[in-house]
Amino acid sequence: MGIEIITTSDGSHSLLNTELDETYHSRHGAVQESIHVFIKEGLDYFLRRQNATDIAILEVGFGTGLNALLTLQRAQEIPNSIHYTSLETYPIPEEIWSKLNYIDSVGLKEKFDQLHQAPWNSATYILPNFELQKRNVTLQQADLSTGFDLIYFDAFAPNKQPEMWEIDVLKKVVDAMKIDGVFVTYCAKGQLKRDLKSLGLVVETLAGPPGKKEMVRGVKKS
């Protein structure tokens, strides 16, 4: 898989998958997109609604580790314990991730290194209240538990990786969510919203991050 580092409009790096001709984040700003979609409308929204001591997060697509880093940063500010499971089929090599400039805006270089250096397929505590388990497996093959509070669905776009957005794959994720669990993604395609509704989520179309009109959040009610 060919990968190139690119600089997005907010100055932060992303990666370009040259085979798919697809970036890992919005070209309008990688950090600001991840903060808006996954932290503001995901984790922070969940924290406002739920009084959970422990929060189980499933991320589909570890990628650059940016979502994990931003979540870890938030974990430093809250008393809750976060159990972060991330699926990734193609881990990026150290020669790539070590050059990413997220520490320029987020900081936490040592923690960013630890996120990437943590062993695959086993649990590691990066902070006393942040447990990471990276799994080198496809979503289709993954054996998921059934207790996730929050889903970060960060696969490549449906036109680039359609198999990740099929309803049977989405059903597997929804089945792994707790009641009142929250699903967030940058994608706002009509078919996705219809499929999530058919799977029992209450779906909202929200304002997207800079450069993107909309995003989607769903809450499991049954």
Image (cartoon, helix red, strand yellow):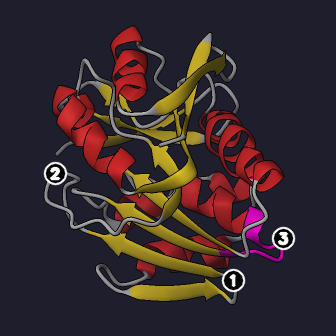
**Residue 70 occupies quadrant:** bottom right
Disc 1 + disc 3, Cβ < 8 Å: yes
Give the percent coordinates (x, y) of residue 102.
64, 53
Q: Is residue 70 left or right of residue 166?
A: right
Q: Would you say the magenta stretch is mainly helix, strand or loop? A: loop
Mark sitting earlier along the chain (1/3): 3
Amino acid at dot 1: Asn
Q: Residue at x 45, y 66 (%)?
A: 147
Amino acid at dot 3: Ile
- Compared to 158, does 152 lie above or below? below
Q: Which mark is residue 78?
A: 3
Q: Nearer the viewer, residue 72 or 139?
A: 139
User: Which residue bears the numbered disc 2?
Assistant: 140
Specify the quadrant that holds the N terminus: top left
Mark sitting earlier along the chain (1/2): 1
Category of crowding for the residue at label 1, using alpha-carbon neighbours closer than 10 angstroms: few (below 14), some (14–19), many (at least 20): some
**Residue 166 occupies quadrant:** top left
**Residue 73 occupies quadrant:** bottom right
Q: Which mark is residue 129?
A: 1
Give the percent coordinates (x, y) of residue 88.
29, 58
Q: Which residues are magenta?
A: 74-81
Q: Residue at x 46, y 23 (%)?
A: 187
Secondary structure category for the residue under label 1: loop
Category of crowding for the residue at label 3, using alpha-carbon neighbours closer than 10 angstroms: few (below 14), some (14–19), many (at least 20): few
